[in-house]
Image (tube, grey):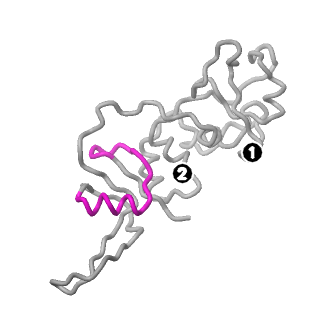
Amino acid sequence: MSARILRLDIAGKPMEWLHWQDAACLYARGLVTWTLGDVIYRVRGGVSRCTGLRSEMQLHSIIACNGRLNPHPRTRPPLTNRALFRRDQNTCLYCGQSFDDGQLTRDHIVPTSRGGRDTWLNVVAACRRCNQHKGNRLLEESNLELLALPYVPNMAEYLALINSHRIRGDQMEFLRSQFSRQSRWLEGALPAA
């Protein structure tokens, strides 16, 4: 798997992950304003007829692009099972055991059948056994307790969550500096069950 490049806006806010080809296009169009981190790709082009020199582009792991600031920045990242399971560190927030993605489910604290919404603050990772036990009941009706409270990750944390298996150290250091205070990734672990 190839490393992705972290794209920031001109103010240094994390925006998205890029493949090296997309980053090279931004470099070639002169849209990269500043960079951080290590050079992770060297792209070689053709030989110039005029100079006889081969062109080369060095792509850094973190790039900031110029342009207008987004007037309507995304305040809540999209809710996906992958990001949810990473937020909860692949742990069932009812029994406290760790599971692979395929063994986890999205549980609604207030079930949708009872007016609950499909939002970051109303969902947790749960193993199939705990989710089936809870059913469409409220926590107090099912005698289950949450091991940690759900929270909405900010964009820096969301980008770390969705790319956690191939994030570079310099990128993680940059993103971690922008995580919210309630982030479980700052501490590195959930409370013991």
Coordinates of residue 112 in the picture (x, y in percent):
67, 18
Question: Which residue is disc 1 drawn over?
Answer: 102
Q: Residue at x 77, y 42 (%)?
A: 103
Task: Left or right? Give the position of 80 relative to 47.
Answer: right
Nearest to the observer: residue 173 or residue 159: 159
**Residue 131 vertical placement versus 38 (above, below):** above
Q: Residue at x 70, y 18 (%)?
A: 111
- Which element type, helix, strand or loop, lies under badge 1? helix
Question: Which residue is disc 2 drawn over?
Answer: 163
Q: Amino acid at mark 2?
A: Asn
Q: Residue at x 80, y 13 (%)?
A: 141
Magenta region includes residue 65: no
What stretch of residues is rendered in magenta?
9-30
Coordinates of residue 76 in the picture (x, y in percent):
47, 31
- Write down the quadrant of residue 98 in the picture: top right
Between circles 2 and 1, the one closer to the viewer is 1
**Residue 25 vertical placement versus 117 (above, below):** below
- Which element type, helix, strand or loop, lies under badge 2? loop
Coordinates of residue 106 in the picture (x, y in percent):
69, 32
Quadrant for the N terminus in the image: bottom right
Task: Left or right? Give the position of 186 relative to 29.
Answer: right
Coordinates of residue 168 in the picture (x, y in percent):
49, 59
Q: Amino acid at mark 1?
A: Gly
Task: Left or right? Give the position of 123 relative to 143.
Answer: left
Mark before the other along the chain sequence, 2 or 1: 1
Q: Residue at x 72, y 32 (%)?
A: 93
Magenta region includes residue 14: yes
